Image (tube, rainbow, N blue to C red):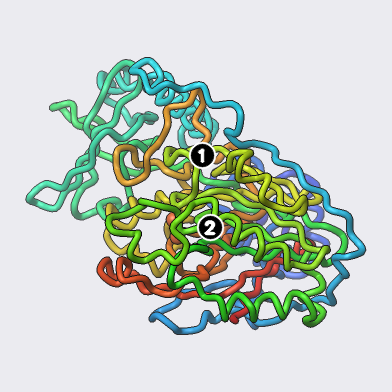
């Protein structure tokens, strides 16, 4: 059997760590286990370790456990409820017994240096290219990647890394990507008859290409490689079952802010059930107020037409939360900070309106709650994903969130609807893989797991506005995703 295992892995072009061999041989159906492992880890690592085996088996177990409570929400129509478990599998811990443990590990607040000069842009894109490029070069499929100039002279299979400058489709259905590195550029053909022709590719993302250069200097792609996130990782959980609740797009100040739904939420969290008592954190991912002058004739849709008045009203609402809930609040495109991302935390003049149980951070922010890493991003770039990629929709924000994880970038498309400030380093790169990735903005809702990361898109507390009606945006308001910080299990509660 040992030989069979080794033959199997060598056929896959990899090696098996001796400890992994021993582990597999000591369990039933070692070859079946190995086959299932290879089905879950793609690409296969150079050496499959015991840890890979254990992690993959852990994932399989937790996936099986999720069958009854799928971590998936694909709202099909406005008003439909998300098919996600309504309750947690584990007994709740009391949030009141746990002191807050919050760190803002990374955001732009107080560190912005850019002035928007040409030099700033050059430096910004160079940082994006180099950081994502080095992630890609560490991928096995891109080992020995060449600079574009050198690759163009090669007659053999080549691997390159580049930033996409343009994507177009020919009249024969082929797709052409223009990609460039710091010295040269190349055109890459994704043949119409290959599955690559339907791959999602967007401008300004950094990717790897494996292919061969034809006699006209065109690189015919065999595969595209994304930085992506590791296939298998364990959720870095707390020991007790305390929970984080996620919301965004409260839009206080709007005429359609859902006062009655908000009161229902408050009543539940103030004297509710065991789950309500386990809510230690409320992560609010932007658009906390409706703002002023965000879109044409917004004044006609406002109940509070003063920006401070809007934040004061929000502060009063948050004051009613019980003491065991600490709020983390980042801005969105409706908030009173610069619209260009990365956005800093709300200014001191606004922060002082709130109680000390509210912690402010920038958009995006990498947060740590008891060691659980949360990447919170408002999600403005979903406008660009939806308008650029056929098949993406405002009702399926998780598709865009997965694309961000694969591209390791929150807002790859430059020059669309998401304004980006050319900071010295690209804060929109997903440098560290989080345990939870939270967004808002699209006024939908959903939770799902992607390669061990819990994806949460939080709902809105605003009903459809005339402006949204005009733009065909059908919100799914007053749904509250909750995540168990011990296990990563997510549920959605509707109010
Ligand atoms: Fe919003
Ligand atoms: Fe927004």
Q: Quadrant of residue 241?
A: bottom right
What percent of the width, then of the height, locates residue 63?
65, 70
**Residue reaching furthest to the left:** 171
- Tell me the distance, in whole angstroms, between the alpha carbons under discs 2 and 1: 19 Å
- Residue 325 left/right relative to 296: right
Residue 221 placed where, x, y %? Answer: 28, 40
**Which mark is drawn over residue 325?**
none
The residue depicted at 28 percent of the width and 70 percent of the height is 472
**Quadrant holding ligand 2?**
bottom left
Density class for disc 1 (Cα within 10 Å; few <14, some 14-19, many ≥20) is many
Percent from the top left, x then y, of residue 360? 66, 45
Q: Which residue is mark 2?
A: 310
Which quarter of the figure has residue 422? top left
Q: Quadrant of the N terminus?
A: bottom right
Foreground of the two, 384 or 85: 384
> Could you tell whether 5 is left or right of 127 in the image?
right
> Which residue is the extreme one toward the right?
97
Q: Nearer the viewer, residue 484 or 408?
A: 484
Of the pair 250 and 252, the residue shown nearer to us = 252
Instruction: Identify which residue is drawn at 70% across, 56% down.
Output: 327
286 lies left or right of 325: left
- Against 488, is 124 above or below? above
Q: Nearer the observer, disc 2 or disc 1?
A: 2
């Amino acid at each position: 059997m040992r030989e069979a295992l080794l033959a199997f892995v060598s056929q896959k072009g990899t090696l098996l760590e001796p400890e992994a061999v021993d582990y597999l041989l000591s369990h039933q159906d070692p070859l079946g286990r190995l086959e299932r492992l290879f089905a879950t880890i793609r690409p296969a690592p150079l050496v499959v370790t015991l840890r890979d085996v254990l992690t993959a088996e852990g994932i399989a177990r937790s996936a099986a456990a999720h069958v009854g409570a799928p971590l998936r929400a694909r709202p099909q129509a406005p008003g439909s409820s998300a098919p996600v478990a309504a309750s947690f599998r584990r007994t709740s811990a009391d949030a009141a017994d746990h002191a807050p443990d919050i760190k803002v590990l990374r955001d732009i607040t107080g560190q912005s240096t850019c002035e928007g000069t040409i030099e700033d842009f050059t430096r910004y894109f160079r940082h994006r290219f180099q950081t994502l490029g080095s992630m890609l070069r560490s991928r096995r499929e891109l080992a020995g990647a060449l600079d574009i100039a050198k690759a163009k002279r090669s007659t053999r299979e080549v691997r390159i890394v580049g930033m996409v400058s343009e994507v177009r489709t020919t009249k024969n259905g082929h797709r052409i990507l223009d990609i460039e590195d710091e010295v040269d550029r190349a055109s890459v053909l994704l043949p119409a008859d290959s599955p690559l022709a339907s791959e999602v590719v967007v401008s300004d993302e950094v990717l790897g290409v494996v292919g061969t250069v034809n006699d006209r200097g065109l690189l015919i792609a065999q595969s595209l490689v994304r930085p992506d996130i590791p296939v298998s990782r364990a959720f870095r959980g707390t020991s007790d079952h305390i929970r984080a609740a996620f919301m965004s797009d409260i839009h206080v100040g709007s005429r359609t802010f859902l006062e009655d739904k908000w009161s229902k939420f408050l009543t539940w969290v103030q004297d509710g059930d065991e789950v309500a008592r386990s809510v230690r954190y409320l992560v609010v991912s932007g658009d906390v107020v409706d703002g002023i002058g965000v879109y044409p004739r917004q004044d006609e849709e406002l109940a509070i037409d003063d920006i401070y008045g809007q934040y004061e009203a929000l502060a009063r609402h948050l004051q009613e939360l019980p003491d065991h809930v600490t709020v983390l609040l980042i801005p969105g495109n409706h908030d009173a900070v610069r619209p260009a991302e990365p956005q800093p935390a709300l200014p001191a003049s606004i922060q002082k309106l709130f109680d000390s149980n509210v912690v402010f951070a920038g958009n995006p922010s990498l947060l740590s709650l008891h060691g659980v890493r949360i990447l919170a991003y408002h999600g403005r770039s979903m406008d660009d994903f939806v308008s650029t990629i056929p098949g993406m929709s405002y009702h399926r924000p998780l598709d865009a969130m997965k694309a961000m994880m694969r591209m390791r970038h929150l807002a790859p498309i430059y020059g669309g609807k998401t304004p980006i400030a050319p900071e010295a380093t690209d804060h929109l790169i997903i440098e560290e893989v989080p345990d939870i990735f939270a967004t808002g903005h699209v006024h939908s809702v959903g939770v799902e797991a992607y390669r061990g990361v819990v994806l949460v898109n939080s709902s809105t507390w605003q009903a459809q506005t005339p402006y949204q009606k005009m733009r065909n945006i059908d919100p799914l308001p007053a749904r509250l995703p909750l995540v168990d910080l011990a296990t990563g299990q997510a549920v959605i509660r509707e109010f």
